[in-house]
C-alpha cells in the first residue's frame, strides 16, 4: 500500500467517513467466498476459448486418488497448470502420464470450488510428438461415443437376402475389383449399385458424403431394386490416408444411413471411426463383401440336403402306403364276404338239423303229443331262423367295417374287367378295354386310352 | 391348400417371378410339411412335385446368376442420378 492518503488510518472504520463509489447505497458489497468463487467459475465456463483446450507441457507431480482419479500438474518454464483425469477417462486413455514426460492434453478449464483452484479437466492425453491426428482422433472418438453413436444397441442386423447392394469406394484401385470379385463368386444373384468417391485427401469426405446421399435415394424404391445394404470400403493406408473415414461428417453419415452399413477400411489392424459407426465392421474390403451376402456353396449344399430329405420322405410315404395296402388285402382275403356267409350258413344249418333231429326223436317216442309237438317244433324252427338272421346281420356289420368300401373311402379304387375280375397289372389291359372303376360312392365306366407299364 | 400350403403345381411364370429366398423358404415349408406326415398320398406326391420344381428353380438361379454391377451417375443440374450398367470387364 504505497498510496498516499490524508485520512486517518482508521477512517474507513467510521461508517460516514468515506463514500464508496461501487456501493452508493451504503458500504462496500461484501460477498461470501463461495459467491465470489462461483462468479469466477461462471466467467471461466463462459469463456469459449477455455472449453476446448489443447495444451502441451511437462508432467509434474502425479497422484491417483482412491476413487481412481488422477491429479497432475503440467508445467513449463513459466507456469503450472493443475489437471484432473477422472477414472472413466483414465480407463479409456491408453497412455499413463508420468512425471517428467512431455505430453499434449485436451480438455476444458473449470473451477474446483472447494479448493478455489481452476484446473484442466482432461479427456485426451498423448505423449507430445505422438501426432496431432491421433489426438484429434481420440477427442472426436470420445465426443461421438458420448453421444452414443457407437452403441451396440444402434447396430442393425444385415439382411439375410440382399438383392441390391450399394457400394461406395474409389473408382480406381483394387477395392472395387476385389469387392465385385467376391460378390460374383459368392452370391451373383445380387445387384450392385456403385457410387464412386474419393477415399483420400481433403476433398474425400465431401465426395463420400455425396455418394452416400445418392445411394440413400435408392433405399426407398419399392420394387426390389432398392438398396438393402451399403458397403463403404477403402484399401489400407497410414492414419493420414485413412483420415477421411475419421471425418466427423462421414462418421455421422454412416451412422445415419437408412440401411445397414458394412465398413471395410484398410487392413486388419486399421480402425477408423467409420468402422465404429458401422453396423458391421469388416477387417478388409473383401471381408465386407463376404459378410454382406450369403454363400452360393452353402446354399447349394442346403438345397441338396432338402432334396435328399424330400426324396426320402416321399419314398417312405409311398412305401408305407404299399405295406398297409398289402396288410389290408390279406385281411380282406380272410374276410371275403362269400366265405363268411357260407361259414355262417353252415353253422346255422347244423343247428337246424340238430333241432329237427331232436324233435323228430321226441315225436317218435311220444306219438300222443304229435300234433302239439309239431306245432311247437315249427315255432322253435322259426326262432332258430330268426337267431340265424341276427347272426348274419352282425357278421355283415363287422364285415362292413373291414370291407373294401371302407378302404375306398380313403381314396383307393378297385378296377375290374366286365367279367368282375380285378385288374392288378397295367399290362393285363389293352387299349380300348372297357373297365369298371369302383369308388366309394359309385363307379365309373372307363375305357383304356393308353397303357403305361412302369414295372422296372 | 393344406395348412396354408399350396400344393398346386407351380407354373413357369410363378417360378420365374420367385426370388431365391422366397423359393427356398417355400421349399423348406414343403419339406417340413412332408416331414410332419399324416398327409393323404396324393397330397404327399403333389407337395413332393412342388418341392422338386422349387429345387430346380433355386438350383438354376444359383447356377445361372450373373452379377450385375451398375454405376451411379449424378444427373446434371440437380436432376436425379441415373444408373448405367458396368461391363463386367470394366471392374475386372
Image: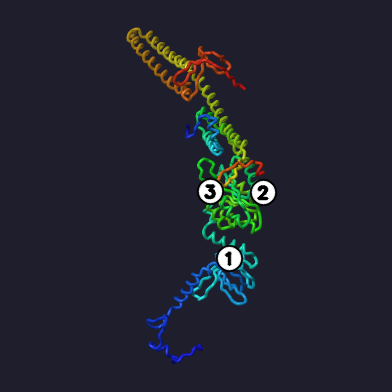
Quickly name the residue at label 2. Answer: A174
Q: Is residue A238 left or right of residue A122?
A: right
The crowd level at tag 2 (other Cα within 10 Å; few <14, some 14-19, many 20+) is: some
Question: From mark 3 to mark 1, how far is it between C-alphas?
Answer: 43 Å
- In depth, the one of A306 and A354 nearer the eye is A306
User: What element does badge 2 sit on?
Assistant: helix
Q: Looking at the picture, how far across and down is residue A174, in whole percent?
A: 67, 48
Tell whether A89 sits left or right of A372. Answer: right
Residue drawn where x is 37% and y is 81% of the image: A25
Which subunit holds the residue at mark 3? B
- Horizontal side of B21 relative to A266 (left or right) equals left
Residues A429 and A254: in front is: A254
For the residues bearing labels 3 and 1, Cβ distance under 8 angstroms: no
Chain letter of disc 1 in the image: A
- Sooner in the amino-acid sequence: mark 2 or mark 1: 1
Give the chain letter at badge 2: A
Circles 2 and 1, Cβ within 8 Å, touching? The answer is: no
User: Where residue A197 sits: x, y (%)?
Assistant: 60, 51
Quarter of the picture holding the C terminus of chain A: top right
**Residue at 55% across, 25% down:** A322
10 Å neighbourhood of mark 1: few (<14), some, or many (≥20)?
Answer: many
Q: Are marks 2 and 1 on the same chain?
A: yes
Residue A199, which numbered label? none
Residue A326 seen in the figure: yes
Query: Residues at marks 3 and 2, common chain?
Result: no
Q: Which mark is residue A124?
A: 1
Estimate the spatial distance between the alpha carbons at disc 2 and disc 1, rounded to whole Å: 36 Å
Task: State the separation of the CA atoms marked 3 and 2.
Answer: 31 Å
> Would you name the residue on which mark 3 appears?
B78
Instruction: Give the secondary structure at mark 1.
Output: strand
Amino acid at each position: 500500500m504505497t498510496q498516499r492518503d490524508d485520512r486517518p488510518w482508521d477512517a474507513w472504520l467510521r461508517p460516514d467517513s468515506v463514500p464508496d463509489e461501487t456501493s452508493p447505497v451504503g458500504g462496500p458489497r461484501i460477498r461470501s467466498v463461495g459467491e465470489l468463487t462461483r462468479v469466477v467459475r461462471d466467467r471461466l465456463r463462459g469463456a469459449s476459448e477455455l472449453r476446448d483446450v489443447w495444451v502441451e507441457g511437462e508432467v509434474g507431480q502425479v497422484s491417483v486418488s482412491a476413487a481412481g482419479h488422477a491429479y497432475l500438474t503440467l508445467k513449463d518454464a513459466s507456469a503450472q497448470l493443475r489437471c484432473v483425469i477422472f477414472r472413466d477417462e483414465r480407463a479409456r486413455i491408453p497412455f499413463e502420464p508420468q512425471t517428467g514426460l512431455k505430453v499434449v492434453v485436451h480438455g476444458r478449464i473449470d473451477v474446483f470450488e472447494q479448493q478455489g483452484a481452476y484446473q484442466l479437466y482432461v479427456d485426451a492425453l498423448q505423449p507430445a510428438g505422438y501426432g496431432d491426428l491421433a489426438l484429434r482422433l481420440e477427442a472426436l472418438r470420445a465426443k461421438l461415443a458420448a453421444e452414443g453413436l457407437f452403441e451396440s444397441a444402434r447396430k442393425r442386423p444385415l439382411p439375410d437376402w440382399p438383392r441390391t447392394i450399394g457400394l461406395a469406394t474409389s473408382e480406381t484401385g483394387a477395392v472395387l475389383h476385389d469387392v465385385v470379385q467376391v460378390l460374383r463368386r459368392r452370391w451373383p444373384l445380387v445387384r450392385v449399385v456403385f457410387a464412386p468417391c474419393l477415399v483420400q485427401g481433403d476433398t474425400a469426405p465431401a465426395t463420400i458424403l455425396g455418394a452416400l446421399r445418392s445411394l440413400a435415394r435408392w433405399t426407398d424404391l419399392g420394387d426390389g431394386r432398392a438398396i438393402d445394404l451399403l458397403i463403404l470400403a477403402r484399401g489400407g493406408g497410414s492414419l493420414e490416408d485413412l483420415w477421411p473415414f475419421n471425418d466427423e461428417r462421414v462418421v455421422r453419415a454412416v451412422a445415419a444411413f437408412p440401411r445397414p452399413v458394412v465398413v471395410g477400411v484398410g487392413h486388419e489392424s486399421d480402425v477408423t471411426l467409420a468402422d465404429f459407426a458401422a453396423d458391421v465392421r469388416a477387417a478388409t474390403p473383401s471381408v465386407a463383401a463376404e459378410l454382406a451376402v450369403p454363400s452360393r456353396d452353402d446354399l447349394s449344399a442346403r438345397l441338396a440336403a432338402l432334396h435328399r430329405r424330400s426324396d426320402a420322405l416321399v419314398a417312405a410315404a409311398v412305401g408305407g402306403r404299399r405295406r398297409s395296402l398289402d396288410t389290408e388285402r390279406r385281411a380282406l382275403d380272410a374276410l371275403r364276404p362269400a366265405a363268411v356267409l357260407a361259414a355262417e350258413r353252415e353253422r346255422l344249418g347244423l343247428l337246424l338239423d340238430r333241432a329237427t333231429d331232436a324233435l323228430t326223436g321226441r315225436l317218435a317216442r311220444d306219438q300222443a303229443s304229435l300234433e302239439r309237438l309239431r306245432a311247437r317244433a315249427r315255432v322253435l324252427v322259426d326262432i332258430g331262423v330268426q337267431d340265424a338272421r341276427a347272426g348274419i346281420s352282425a357278421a355283415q356289420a363287422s364285415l362292413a367295417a373291414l370291407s373294401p368300401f371302407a378302404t375306398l373311402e380313403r381314396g383307393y379304387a378297385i378296377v375290374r374287367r366286365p367279367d368282375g375280375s380285378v385288374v392288378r397289372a397295367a399290362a393285363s389291359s389293352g387299349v380300348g378295354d372297357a373297365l369298371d372303376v369302383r369308388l366309394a360312392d359309385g363307379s365309373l365306366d372307363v375305357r383304356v386310352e393308353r397303357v403305361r407299364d412302369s414295372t422296372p | 391348400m393344406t395348412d396354408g400350403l399350396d400344393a398346386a403345381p407351380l407354373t413357369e411364370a410363378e417360378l420365374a417371378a420367385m426370388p431365391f429366398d422366397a423359393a427356398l423358404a417355400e421349399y423348406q415349408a414343403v419339406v417340413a410339411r412332408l416331414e410332419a406326415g399324416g398327409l393323404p398320398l396324393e397330397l404327399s406326391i403333389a407337395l413332393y412335385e412342388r418341392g422338386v420344381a422349387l429345387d430346380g428353380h433355386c438350383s438354376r438361379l444359383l447356377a445361372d446368376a450373373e452379377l450385375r454391377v451398375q454405376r451411379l451417375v449424378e444427373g446434371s443440374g440437380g436432376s436425379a442420378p441415373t444408373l448405367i450398367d458396368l461391363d463386367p470387364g470394366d471392374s475386372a
